[in-house]
Image: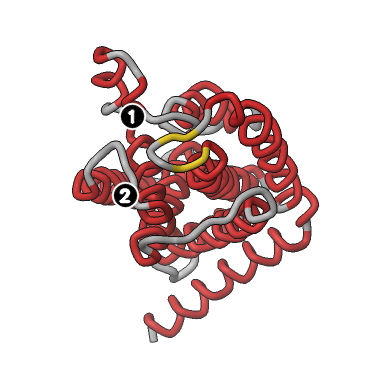
Amino acid sequence: MNASVNWVGFKTIVRKEVTRILRIWGQTIVPPAITMTLYFIIFGELIGRRIGEMHGFSYMQYIVPGLVIMSVITNSYGNMVSSFFGAKFGKHIEELLISPLSNWIILSGYVVGALLRGLMVGTVVLAVSLFFTPIEVQHPLIMLSVLLLTAVVFALAGMVNAIFAQKFDDIAIIPTFVLAPLTYLGGVFYSISLLPGFWQQVSVFNPILYMVNGFRYGMLGVSDVSLAMTYGVILTAGVILFATCLYLLHRGTGLRT
C-alpha cells in the first residue's frame, strides 16, 4: 500500500513539474537557447577565429560541450530552487510534508522535474550548436551519464538553497555569486593547460571543472582531468547533497512554521 501511495505521489510531483516547465516554456526553454546562441556567435564565430584550434578541434567545437553542460547546470539548479521555494512560499509544501509520502519520494519527484528541464534545455542548446559546427559524439554513454549525474547534483544543490532561502532575493545569491563564477572558471571556454601552474592547481578544486571535462570527453574524446576523478567528484557530491536534503526534509528545516 505504501509503495502504491509513493508511486502515485512521485508521478504527481513529476507531472506538476513538467506541466509547469511547459506552461511557461517562453521563460524556461527559450531564454537559454537565445543566450547560448549569442555565446556561439560571439565566442565561437568572432573570438574563435582568432584563437584557432584547441586540442585538435576548432574553438567552436571545443566550447560546445561546455556551453551545453553550463545550460544544464543553470537550468536544473534554477528549476529546483524556484519551484521548491515557490511551494514553500505558497505554503502548499506543508501538504506534502504531512502526507504519507516518504521524504525521499518528495525529493526524487522534484529532482526528476529539475533533471527534465535541464535535459530539455541541453538538447535545445546542442541542436542550436549544430547550426554552427558539426559534432561527432565519441562516447555517448559517458556523455549521457555525466549529463544526467550533473543535472541531479545541481538539482539537489538547488533544493538546499530553496530550503534555507527566506525570501525571493535569497534564491538569486548562490547562482549569482557562487554558481556563475565557478561555471565560467570551470573550463567552459578554455583548457586549464593554458593557465599558469598555480592557477591550474587552484582550478582542480572547482567541481564544475570535472563535470565540464567529463562531458567534453564524452563528446570530443579530450579532457583536462581523468575520467575516474570526474565520476568520483560527481558521485561524491551527489551522495552528500542527497543525504543533506533528506536530513533537512526530515528535520523540517526552514519548512515548518
Q: Mark 2 — residue?
A: 238
Q: Where is residue 66 in the image (x, y as percent from the top left)?
A: 49, 41
Q: In this picture, is 236 found above or below 169?
A: below
Residue 250 at least partly seen? no
Mark count: 2
- Which residue occupies the foreground of this view, 163 or 209? 209
Q: Which of marks 1 and 2 is nearer the N terminus?
A: 1
Q: In this picture, is 175 found above or below 215?
A: above
> Mark 1 to mark 2: distance in Å?
15 Å
Q: Position of residue 128 (x, y in %)?
A: 68, 53
Q: Which mark is residue 206?
A: 1
Residue in view at x 42 percent, y 40 percent: 253
Q: How crowded is mark 2: few (under 14 residues within 10 Å), some or many (20 or more)?
A: many
> What residue type is disc 2 on?
Gly
Q: In this picture, is 194 found above or below 58?
A: above
Marks 1 and 2: which is nearer the front?
1
- Which residue occupies the foreground of this view, 160 or 148? 148
Residue in view at x 34 percent, y 26 percent: 192
> What residue type is disc 1 on?
Asn
Q: Position of residue 248 (x, y in %)?
A: 37, 45
Q: Where is residue 97 in the image (x, y as percent from the top left)?
A: 48, 58
Q: How is the image coloured?
A: secondary structure
Element type at mark 1: loop
Residue in view at x 49 percent, y 28 percent: 184
Q: Which quadrant: the N terminus?
A: bottom left
Element type at mark 2: helix
Taking the image as shown, residue 115 lies to the left or right of residue 225, namely: right
- Which residue occupies the foreground of this view, 173 or 197? 197
